[in-house]
Image (tube, grey):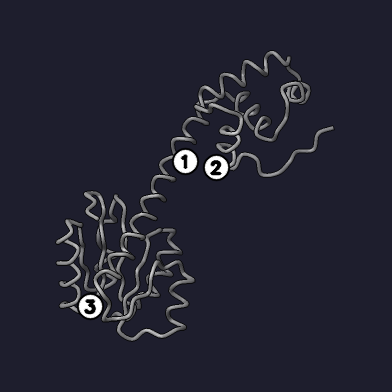
């Protein structure tokens, strides 16, 4: 389970439990960062690697559910595993609806926590990879000329070279040249790949009206 880049954040006001979780995670060579309160957590620098948050529901001042809502509003995506000694069904439902990975009632088994953490880290890793891929995709699209961008959108809409040429008033051979160049710049090895890129970039929101 060891992951040199993974970071597990733990917020719990029980010093003994906090320390116990820290020892468990560090025994697996995981980077555990422990916090006694939500304000202490919010003051810390956000991690820059795959992250998971182990969060007590009942904390002094704001609750763990309050923090979950705050993170959602701030568009700060962190997989959350709730832990509590006083859980109930409405509370767990609220947590899971808010996107929590798991809701564990104390005392829980170490393996239950580790399984949930593994799931949280894998999800956060996948999310980060998707975001990095989208940034690279946007950079490639930005490298296209205005005409190449226009033709890419038309191709993604399923328009043929002849139709595109008629729509924008250029020769079909010219469309073919632009299309070849934009596919090379976008690193698309097929029309299907190009269409998927257009979807990720949200270039084709609705069908235009052609005469």
- Tell me the quarter of the image containing the N terminus: bottom left
Tell me if 135 is positioned left or right of 150 in this view: left
Q: Position of residue 117 (x, y in %)?
A: 31, 63
Question: Which type of secondary structure does the marked residue at label 1 adopt?
Answer: helix
> Between marks 2 and 1, how big is the CA–CA gap?
7 Å
Residue 13 bears which disc, if any? 3
Disc 2 to disc 1: CB gap under 8 Å: yes
Residue 69 bears which disc, if any? none
Q: Is the residue marked by circle 1 packed among few (<14), some (14-19), or many (20+) residues within 10 Å?
A: some
- The residue identified by callout 1 is 134
Tell which circle, 2 or 1, labels the residue nearer the N-terminal end.
Answer: 1
Is 127 above or below relative to 54? above
Q: Position of residue 73 (x, y in %)?
A: 46, 64
Disc 3 to disc 1: CB gap under 8 Å: no
Q: Using the image as rendered, state which of residue 77 and residue 196 is in the foreground.
A: 196
Question: Which type of secondary structure does the marked residue at label 2 adopt?
Answer: helix
Tell which circle, 3 or 1, labels the residue nearer the N-terminal end.
Answer: 3
Q: Is the residue marked by circle 3 packed among few (<14), some (14-19), or many (20+) residues within 10 Å?
A: some
> Between marks 3 and 1, how big is the CA–CA gap?
38 Å
Q: Quadrant of residue 30?
A: bottom left
Q: Is the residue marked by circle 2 packed among few (<14), some (14-19), or many (20+) residues within 10 Å?
A: some
Q: Position of residue 17 (x, y in %)?
A: 19, 76
Tell me if 154 is positioned left or right of 76 in this view: right
Tell me if 143 is positioned left or right of 114 in this view: right
């Amino acid at each position: 389970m060891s992951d040199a880049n993974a970071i597990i954040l733990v917020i719990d006001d029980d010093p003994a439990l906090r320390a116990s979780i820290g020892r468990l995670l560090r025994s697996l060579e995981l980077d555990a960062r422990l916090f006694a309160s939500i304000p202490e957590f919010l003051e810390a620098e956000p991690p820059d690697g795959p992250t998971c948050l182990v969060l007590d529901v009942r904390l002094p001042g704001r609750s763990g559910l309050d923090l979950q809502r705050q993170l959602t509003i701030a568009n700060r995506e962190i997989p959350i595993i709730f832990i509590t000694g006083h859980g109930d069904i409405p509370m767990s439902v609220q947590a899971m609806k808010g996107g929590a990975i798991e809701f564990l009632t104390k005392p829980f088994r170490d393996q239950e926590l580790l399984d949930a953490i593994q799931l949280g880290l894998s999800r956060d890793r996948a999310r980060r990879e998707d975001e990095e891929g989208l940034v690279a995709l946007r950079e490639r699209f930005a490298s296209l000329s205005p005409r190449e961008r226009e033709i890419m959108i038309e191709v993604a809409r399923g328009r043929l070279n002849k139709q595109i040429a008629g729509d924008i008033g250029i020769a079909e051979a010219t469309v073919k040249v632009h299309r070849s160049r934009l596919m090379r710049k976008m690193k698309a090895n097929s029309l299907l790949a190009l269409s998927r890129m257009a979807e990720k970039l949200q270039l084709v929101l609705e069908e235009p009206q052609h005469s």
